[in-house]
Image (tube, rainbow, N blue to C red):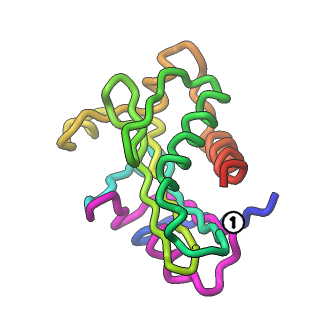
């Protein structure tokens, strides 16, 4: 409730798109994209995703105050993500300050928060669901996915179920 979700096949970046709409988009606006051509991470890094192997989305949230009190937003979002994933049965996921989720030392998800002076935040999230073989070798650091976290203990839920659980957890937190 209270979230407006738009699904795109392709875009440059969900966060960039929501930021361009920040003057008119409602709080709780969410853009989910199957393939981002220029997904962004912290410090200008590119977020690489693999279509159905990843879940990439951004949420716009209006806090109605100046940005200064929102300095802990990345941490709050990371904790909300871990809690939402734990509720789905995924255990052992840790927060690496300020914007990563790790499982056994490998990156599972990345978070990028951008806040305007008007108290509008755009929260971008990339979550690895089931990466294809060889994808991890193309990256500079160890990565993992929810399929590996499940490790046969629980089934990997449908991406839509993960999205719904994560969005509900984020909305409750925010």
SS state under label 1: loop
Q: Which range of residues does the magenta coloring cover?
A: 15-44
Q: Which one is in front, 117 or 25? A: 117
Q: Position of residue 44 (x, y in %)?
A: 27, 64
The front one of 154 and 107 is: 107
Q: Position of residue 143 (x, y in %)?
A: 31, 35
What residue is rendered at 40% in x and 71% in y? Answer: 12
Q: Quick check: 174 above or below 133?
A: below
Q: Residue drawn at (50%, 49%), measured in percent from left and top?
A: 55
The residue to which callout 1 is attached is: 28
What percent of the width, then of the height, locates residue 19?
Answer: 50, 77
Q: Residue at x 60, y 22 (%)?
A: 155
Looking at this view, is 170 or 138 the one in front? Answer: 170
Quarter holding the N terminus? bottom right
Quadrant, the C terminus? bottom right
Of all residues shown, which one is farthest toward the top?
A: 153
Question: Would residue 101 appear left or right of 87 to someone viewing this image?
Answer: left
**Left or right of 24 on screen, residue 134:** left
Percent position of residue 166, x then y = 63, 44
Label 1 CA crowd tier, 10 Å (few <14, some 14–19, many 20+): many
Q: Magenta span has 75?
A: no
In this rendering, position of residue 26 left or right of residue 92: right
Residue at figure coordinates x 48%, y 31% from the top left: 146
Q: Is residue 19 magenta?
A: yes
Quadrant assignment, res 23: bottom right
Indicate the quadrant where residue 46 lies: bottom left
Q: Would you identify the image quadrant in which residue 36 lies? A: bottom left
* Residue 155 in the image: above or below residue 12: above
């Amino acid at each position: 409730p209270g979230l407006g979700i738009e699904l795109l096949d392709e875009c440059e970046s969900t966060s960039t798109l929501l930021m361009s709409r920040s003057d008119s988009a409602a709080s709780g606006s969410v853009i989910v994209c199957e393939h981002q051509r220029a997904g962004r991470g912290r410090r200008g890094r590119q977020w690489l995703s693999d279509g159905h192997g990843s879940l990439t989305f951004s949420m716009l949230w209006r806090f109605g105050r100046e940005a200064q009190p929102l300095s802990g937003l990345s941490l709050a979002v990371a904790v909300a993500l871990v809690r939402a994933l734990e509720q789905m049965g995924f255990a052992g996921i840790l927060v690496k300050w300020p914007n990563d989720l790790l499982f056994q030392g490998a990156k599972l998800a990345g978070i990028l928060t951008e806040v305007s002076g008007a108290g509008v935040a755009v929260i971008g999230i990339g979550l690895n669901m089931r990466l294809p073989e060889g994808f991890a070798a193309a990256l500079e650091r160890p990565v993992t996915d929810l399929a590996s976290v499940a490790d046969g203990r629980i089934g990997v839920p449908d991406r839509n179920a993960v999205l719904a659980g994560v969005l509900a957890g984020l909305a409750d937190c925010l």
